[in-house]
Image (cartoon, rainbow, N blue to C red):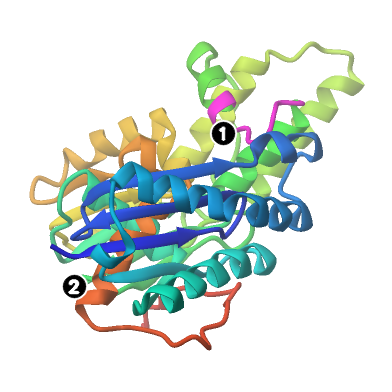
Amino acid sequence: MTKIISFESSADETSVAIVEDGCTILSNAVATQINSHQRFGGIVPEVASRHHIEWITRVLDDALQTANIKPIELDAVAVTYGPGLVGSLLVGLMGAKTFALAHNLPIIPVNHLAGHIAAANFNRPIIYPALALMVSGGHTELVLMREENNFSVLGETRDDAAGESFDKVGRLLKLPYPAGKTIDDMAHIGQATIKFPTAMAHEDNYDFSFSGLKSAVINYVHHAEQKGETINRNDLAASFQNAVIDALLGRTRRALQDFPVKSFVLAGGVAANSQLRQALAELLEQFQNTQFIPVPQLYTGDNAAMVGAAGYWNYKKKKFAGLDLNTNPGLDFELLES
């Protein structure tokens, strides 16, 4: 049994977890900063970094105590080194290095995006080849995995990420940050009575675009305000969410048709959206040879358990790093060569 302690601090969650064999969570301590950033309507990097410093040792102690494990029982230390906010990443990285040095453990560098996808193994094992839809506040990508720990981007957003568009529309409607859960709840009450555009629907690629949709929602609200009309916010939320999901489904359907795979993973913070999960489950019914594996809702957000899952992939391939490991805020997967 391989036990890996993992550190995650790429954005506004400080987290340390202990994961066994990449699929069994022994502990997952998370300190969130949502309350600190809500008044700003988004993450303030300097504030996030300071909170990580305050919480890193506390969540480390919590993770070890919850798992009832001593450092000598651990096999490695995994840590997110990108992508993310550079100041935030540095806190987790230094914490991981210090722990590894103190206990003579190897360091495993982990791509934050790989962590989101690897968290699907907390649901059931990913079967390869696989396709993943990675949907979060900073990324919207379709990723092909021909084998474990092998990632090629088929398509990505050309502007706003899906989660980013949720937060921007949330600010327009004066909803609390982050707005995704609130918009999802409102959408279940309202009706999709407004037709918003689905960008790039007829283009022959797997890319996404949500900037135009965001602008269409802003224009709709401003036009209604100028005319003195009352907006049904629940209907607006339902219409906006429908447009986002239509865009995600269209590209996903094309990729599944062009790349026959054995499993399909839904990952990232927006993977918690109930309508998206249901719509993809229905879509996958058309692909009988592909198993739908959404990341469990509890682990769709940023957490160290997912870093431990991806870290196990690297551990098996002996992908270790030295104490000179640095952050890579712009880290991404490679684009698939055409």
**Upstream in sequence: badge 1 or badge 2:** 2
Give the residues drawn in magenta, as a range: 174-182
* Residue placed most toward the observer, 106 or 176: 106
Label total for image: 2
Q: Quadrant of residue 166?
A: top right
In this figure, which residue is indicated by the disc labeled 2?
A: 147
* Residue placed most toward the observer, 328 or 103: 103
Give yes or no for contact between labels 1 and 2 (Cβ–Cβ under 8 Å).
Answer: no
Q: Residues within 10 Å of mark 2 (few under 14, many from 20)?
A: few
Eyeballing the image, is 65 above or below 101?
A: above
Residue 234 appears at what percent x and percent y?
Answer: 61, 16
- Assign a secondary structure to mark 1: helix
Q: Residue at x 21, y 42 (%)?
A: 284
Q: Amino acid at mark 1?
A: Gly
- Assign a secondary structure to mark 2: loop
Q: Which label is found at residue 180?
A: 1
Residue 123 appears at what percent x and percent y?
Answer: 21, 43
